[in-house]
Image (cartoon, rainbow, N blue to C red):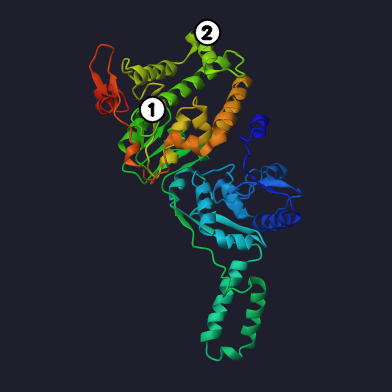
Amino acid sequence: MMRLIEKGLMFGNLFEVSSNALVERYNRALKHLTGKETHLTDFHIDISGYSPEIGDELDDDLYLNPNGCNRQFILLSTQQKSAPLLNAKFSTSREILKHFINDNERQLFALTARDAVAGELVNSIYSVSDPARLFQIRQVEIEADTTESHIVDAHNLLTKIDTFQTGADAWWDDVLIADMIELAKKSGDIVRNPINLKTATFRQDNFYTAHFGGIYIFRDVKRPAAVTVGPPEAVVPLPIKSVYGFDDRNGIARFLEKNGLVESIVEARNLNTAALLQQRLDFILVDTAATAGEDLTGKSRLELRRVARRHLKNLPEAFHALNDLLRWVEDGSDWPNIDSEHPAYFYTLRATQTKDRDLVNMLLAELTPMDVRQLFICHKEAFYRAYLTWSDQKKSYVADFLAEEYAVDKAGARRALFGPEPGMQEEPSDAPQDVVISQSTDGPAIPAKDMIQRVGPWGAVRRAR
């Protein structure tokens, strides 16, 4: 994994803790939350304050996430909001923390100037003893305060000020006045500089959890379902009607289409379909060539094609189908028959622009593991697991590609692949024009959009079913 770390593809963009003051504040917060302390004098932390170095020191990667359920956090700076979340057990956790920091940035900036802010992402359960308990999670609330209880003290001081101003004979209450003075020494002038964090409660209806081998839960859709990475029988019974395992490709495909969660890459707006298909073909070539022991260092696309000719018989069925689809896009060759059982099927989809876009792309990335770029962008934990199984040739090629082609413009790459963030409006002039493509070499010309409407993203076989 050192290759990924050196290229900034793993543990990248973490917040560095190296000053004595920050280390001391971190230790106070760590002891406050867990009763433990670190002896390290410099380390790096993610958005939640988790440090991989401290995880190694304590031999506990979940020292801030006991039972993998209610994530605790330590904020030393609002700059942590741009850091990743490591060892995430729920797909929503990072966005919840990021929203919390953004919504309270001014207050958190002031608080972290003198102390660490420690807290917890609290839901309605304290452990995940069986898969069914995951469905008891409906919302997550953030509880936070400094290690010296500045927020609680400020609330207490406000209450006492109110009593002092409105209570009968409160002006003569020496105990009340003494309490106010002591609290003011800790919290400062809360009249001019109020200390209060906005209530932070977040709905968690649709999410991915790494528990039990990985489960995607969709409750806030027209036809709710759960999709399990492993065999469904290992996690059932679940309190939801439809449960699909990764082997049930038809079931997953039906679920995604019926809920309008996916679209064909051929009809997707603002997507260079030919470039995307060509890149996915290259990734499959790399996988095949690396398995055969080919040295892929510095290989151009032309050289990869030469490699393909040498290993043509070993190329998977998905490669040939995607190549047929590329020819259909580029020169109007025969429309390929790619139904939901075909190995190439999920490579022909992307998520629609809904609030669950990132979750659906995460699912699609795990269903299309040979597209290493999408796997890295959408599901890093799955990428790291897959990376450990690759040959050294493939590891080197993929690391170089991601460092040189993706990392230089992450936002642009995501926008090009997945479209703008959900809810963002685009100018009508950006809409693609209908591309006229022949259904077959001898057949009549049919607009691409009409072809998709005729057969759907499933292919003609699905319609026959």
Instruction: Please tell me whether residue 282 is drawn above or below residue 197 in the rendered image.
Output: above
Indicate the position of residue 11 as horizontal and vertical percent values: 63, 39
In the image, residue 217 lies at what x, y percent?
42, 42
Element carrying mark 1:
helix
Marked residue nearer the N-terminal end (1 or 2): 1
Question: On the picture, is 33 further left or further right than 267?
Answer: right
Callout 1 amino acid:
Arg
Circle 1 packing at 10 Å, graded few (<14), some (14-19), many (20+), is: some
Question: Is residue 419 or residue 116 the one in the foreground?
Answer: 419
In the rendered image, residue 341, in percent from the top left (x then y), is placed at 36, 23
Q: Image quarter for residue 101?
A: bottom right
Q: Nearer the viewer, residue 71 or 189?
A: 189
- Seen at 55% across and 58% down, the residue is 105
For the residue marked with disc 2, what is the amino acid? Arg
Which one is nearer the viewer's eye here, 441 or 166?
A: 441
Q: Which residue is mark 1?
A: 249
Element at label 2: helix
* Pointer 2 residue: 310
The x, y position of residue 146, in whole percent, is 63, 62
Q: Is residue 320 left or right of residue 83?
A: left
